[in-house]
Amino acid sequence: MAKPSLSPLAHAVTVFDDELAAYARLAELFLKTPLDSVKHLERANTTLGEIAAVEERLQAAGQGLLQALSGARARQEQLAKEVVAHAPQLGARNQQLRELMDAMSALAGDVSALHAVVQQDGDVTGPAQTADALEVSERVLGLSSRAEALAATAHEAELPEVGTQAHALHQRLAAIGKKLQRAAGN
């Protein structure tokens, strides 16, 4: 599997860290090299030259790190501005969702209240209660229409989850309302 590419900042840190490690290794070697023979003196002079070369690369890596850090900071600042500019859109969408959910809750409450009325009155489809059945049927169909309108509003607001729930409620209520109308003799 291929390694993910490093960001410019991570690459600059890696280069700087590598040069710093090379410097530390050469400095330790230089400091531990005995100076008691020609061979050791030559090795110490060579190591000192390598240290000077690493110092130059370390300085260049430091400059690269500063540039990468500056670039990363500028990108973060730009993203922060974009986040702040986008936050009101989130607030507006949250408000839309809250309004739709409040409407859905109110609709569910009205359905519950109607259900409680029907339960208290008993079987609304009996011959003696045909008028009640028609009234309940009209109320159910009215709630179905509200659910249908809520579904359309939710879909227009591009909140399909709420729209799907409202549409399903509309279909159930419409079916119940039609059955009640048929049972009442209409």
Image: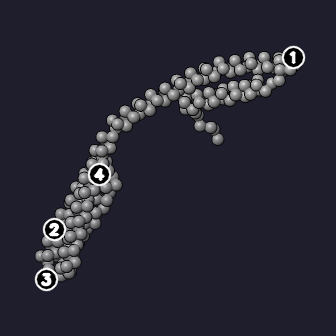
Q: Where's residue 134, x and y in %?
A: 14, 72
What residue is at 14 percent from the left and 76 percent from the top?
132
Farthest-out residue, left: 131
Give the distance between the C-alpha atoms of the residues marked 4 and 1, in whole angstroms: 83 Å
- Amino acid type of disc 2? Glu
Residue that label 2 marks: 138
Residue that label 1 marks: 38
- Amino acid type of disc 3? Ala
Residue that label 3 marks: 128
Q: Nearer the viewer, residue 88 or 104?
A: 88
- Amino acid type of disc 1? Val
Q: Secondary structure at mark 1?
A: helix
Would you call the spot at circle 2 few (<14 residues within 10 Å), some (14-19), or many (20 or more)?
some
Q: Quadrant of residue 143?
A: bottom left
Q: Where's residue 18, x and y in %?
A: 66, 29
- Amino acid type of disc 4? Leu
Q: Where's residue 71, x and y in %?
A: 48, 26
